[in-house]
Amino acid sequence: MSLVRLNIKGISYSQTQNGAYALILNEVEGDRKLPIVIGAFEAQSIAIALEKEIRPPRPLTHDLFKNFADRFDIVVKQVIIHKLVDGVFYSSLICERDKIEEIIDARTSDAIALALRFQAPIFTYKNILDKAGIYLKVNPKKDDEQEDSILVDDLVAEELESAFQETYKGKSIEELHSLLDEAVANEDYEAAAKIRDEISKR
């Protein structure tokens, strides 16, 4: 399976999912966007890493991981979003120490927060982008401004909301409750927030 490189396009606040944000990844050689629901803490951590001028007074969790890795000569070489199951993305950190490569499982939001701190490239497989990638109708006059902006405008947010709603649309209430229990048990609060809001809408 061929890998597709992604860049971070921006972060959008979810109007329908309380406390949730959408991280938008953009394929480097194409127009598709990959929206991923993340929590508020992870959104803040990614935003701080994107804004080089913002320095928190004390290290955030991802900063601590970076400092720890630096101290022990561990480098995150790349991040791969390798699986998509029931709307949940699974990622791996490809790390290296003493020329020995290790693969570590990670939540996608954490993996991207770390990729930014290590200046590591982000990839996904073509079949995942084919399945979950969307085209956003962005105002071309605003496009240049958005490249330098962390927050994505309302038009993009609306497109994302409609894309998120499709994920669990075909599930029954029983299936949604089962998925919610599973997400909470796995501490996947990103997915839990999406499922909970879909249940509330029903």
Image: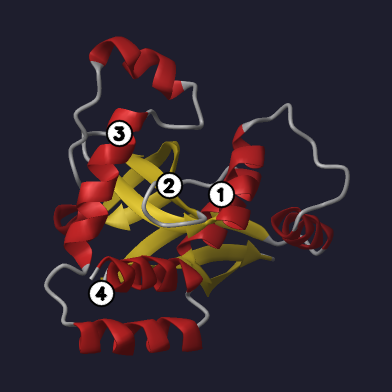
Disc 3 vs disc 4: Cβ atoms closer than 8 Å?
no
Residue 73 shown left or right of residue 167 in the figure: right
Give the amino acid type for the residue marked by disc 3 in the picture.
Val
Report how far apart the C-alphas of labels 1 and 2 lie in the structure. 8 Å
Disc nearer the start of the sequence (2/3): 2
Disc nearer the start of the sequence (3/4): 4
Disc 1 vs disc 2: Cβ atoms closer than 8 Å?
yes
Which residue occupies the extreme right position in the image? 57
> Can you tell which quarter of the image residue 40 is in?
bottom right
Q: Is residue 72 visible in the rendered structure shown here? A: yes
Q: Split into 4 quadrants, where in the image is the N terminus?
A: bottom left
Label 1 packing within 10 angstroms: few (<14), some (14-19), many (20+): many
Give the amino acid type for the residue marked by disc 4 in the picture.
Asp
Viewer-closest of 10 and 166: 166
Nearer mark to the viewer, of 3 and 4: 3
Which residue occupies the extreme top position in the image? 141
**Residue occupied by mark 2:** 23
Q: Which mark is residue 86?
A: 4
**Residue occupied by mark 3:** 156
Which percent across, then down, holds residue 78?
A: 50, 54
Q: Secondary structure at mark 2?
A: strand
Instruction: Say which residue appears at 25% left-offset and 18% top-offset.
Output: 139
Give the amino acid type for the residue marked by disc 1 in the picture.
Ala
Report how far apart the C-alphas of labels 3 and 1 lie in the structure. 17 Å
**Residue occupied by mark 1:** 43
Which percent across, then down, holds residue 164?
A: 26, 56
